[in-house]
Amino acid sequence: MARHSVRAYAKEIPDRDTIQTLLEAAVHAPTAMHEEPWAFVVMQDEALLRQVSDIAKPLFIARLHRIHRSSSHVLDDNFNIFHDAGTLIVICAKPSGIYVEADCWLAAENLMLAACALGLGTCVIGSAVDALNRADMKELIGIPAEYNAIAPIIVGIPAGEITITAKKAPLILAWK
């Protein structure tokens, strides 16, 4: 219940040992047929993160327009799709099985829960997936061509108080 999406980060970035701990938690996620399809890219280079953000923004805006959603905050030149977090972890996989994406999302949740337990903030940045899966972007950030970016997650030290949003009550369709 303590895990929440964080969209404001301090400048300090988590160290290598902390990131390794998060990756260890991720690979302990349940997996269909014990495939363990995940692979990881860790980005902590501020200039590279800004470059990826700048490439991802117009693709995200185009997607928002296609589904008739507002994008005014994204249009701001200073808006960083990664909310100025100093670390991006991209969970990737080869499209090799029917549950590969589900397995990666289970790993993502394990990673986010571990980060929360360590006092770190996280947020899934689904709006970056289109950019991360472009061939030129894969080459730039080190994702082999045969892999797909599935779950991009920013990680960092929250700046200030975490804004907690209300959640809907569970919608129970049946209980027999």
Image: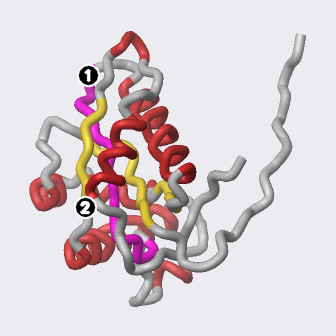
- As for residue 86 lying within the magenta part, the answer is yes
Residue matched to label 2? 43
The 10 Å Cα crowd at callout 2, few under 14, some 14 to 19, many 20 or more, is some
Foreground pick, 56 / 124 = 124
Span colored in magenta: 83-96
Q: Measuring from the top left, give residue 80's x and y in whole percent.
A: 40, 78
Mark 1, secondary structure of its residue: loop
Q: Quadrant of residue 92?
A: top left
* Residue labelled with disc 1: 96
Q: Quadrant of the C terminus?
A: top right
Of the image marks 2 and 1, the number of the one nearer the N terminus: 2
Q: Residues within 10 Å of mark 1 (few under 14, many from 20)?
A: few
Q: Position of residue 81 (x, y in %)?
A: 42, 71
Residue 72 lies left or right of residue 97; in this view the side is right
Query: What amino acid is at disc 1?
Result: Ser
Residue 146 lies in quadrant? top left
- In the rendered structure, the answer to whether residue 27 lies left or right of residue 142 reads right
Residue drawn at 27 percent across, 71 percent down: 49
User: Residue 149: within the magenta?
Assistant: no
Number of dots carrying numbers: 2
Using the image, determine if residue 4 lies above or below residue 114.
below
Residue 154, compared with residue 168, is above or below; it is below
Looking at the rendered structure, the secondary structure element under dot 2 is: strand
Examine the image and state in which quarter residue 137 appears: bottom left
Q: Is residue 1 above or below residue 158?
A: above
Q: Horizontally, is 33 left or right of 131 in the view? A: right
Residue at 35%, 37% in the rendered image:
24
Q: CA distance from mark 2 to mark 1?
A: 25 Å
Where residue 97 sits in the image (x, y, percent)? 32, 19
